[in-house]
Image: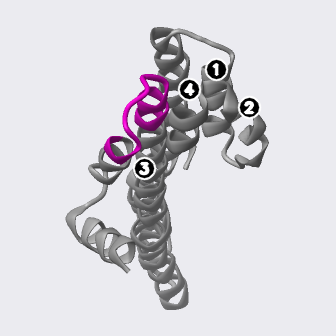
Amino acid sequence: RYSRLARRDGILALDKVINEVDDQFFYEGLRMIVDGAKPEAIKEVLRNEIDFLAARHRVGISIFKAMGQYSPAFGMIGTLIGLILMLRNLNDVNQIASSMALALVTTFYGAILANILFLPIAGKLKERSEAEILKKEMILAGILAIQAGEVPGMVEQRMVSFLPTEYRRLYMKSEAT
């Protein structure tokens, strides 16, 4: 739509519809086009935003990965503490049982926290980060194509090329109907 408008009525026509755009990244890209920024400048600004977004995401992902990697180690430390307590009280059968339970439960908690909480969260954050970065890469490609005055059909084809094959087929079917 934006490509057709820019091609038909000129780049400045985008100024009339730019406030409809909800995505801040897309808005900034269109704003730079309307303001007459050079393609290199637009690419540099938007690429910096993508790079810093990816860096911020990597920090969050690495925190959960580290927590997932260290949890079993902390569980083993708890196990060692439980075994030390057990060995200190070998004369008392009740103390041996409770110390052994402590030893086993800390290993259990370490494994559970790592494999059911922290590592899955890290994986989900990574997936979402990759999806958000891909979306921004698509927007960047579209912005540069619109600014270059590419034919709207080519802009559309450029956007569709980012999609996995199964989504391309769905898109093509929806466009045909």
Query: In what element is the residue under mark 4?
Result: helix
Determine which of the numbered discs, if any, sits on residue 15 in the image: 2
Which of marks 4 and 3 precedes in the sequence? 4
Circles 3 and 4, Cβ within 8 Å, touching? The answer is no
Image height of 48 relative to 170, above or below: above
Number of numbered tags placed on the structure image:
4
User: Marks 4 and 1: which is nearer the front?
Assistant: 1
Query: In what element is the residue under mark 1?
Result: helix
Circles 1 and 3, Cβ within 8 Å, touching? The answer is no
Which of marks 3 and 2 precedes in the sequence? 2
- Callout 2, which amino acid? Asp
Of residue 12 and residue 9, the one placed in the foreground of this image is 9
Range covered by the magenta-colored residues: 140-154
Residue 143 lies in the magenta stretch = yes
- Callout 3, which amino acid? Lys
Q: Is residue 7 left or right of residue 166?
A: right
Residue receiving disc 3: 65
Q: CA distance from mark 3 to mark 4?
A: 24 Å
Which of marks 2 and 4 precedes in the sequence? 2
Q: Is residue 155 left or right of residue 15?
A: left
Q: Residue at x 21, y 65 (%)?
A: 165
How far from the left and from the top, in percent, is residue 99?
A: 50, 77
Residue receiving disc 1: 32
Residue closest to the far front? 8
Residue 31 appears in which quarter of the rendering? top right
Residue receiving disc 4: 49
Task: Count neighbours of disc 1 (C-alpha within 10 A) and say few if under 14, some if 14 to 19, many if 20 or more.
Answer: some
- Callout 4, which amino acid? Glu
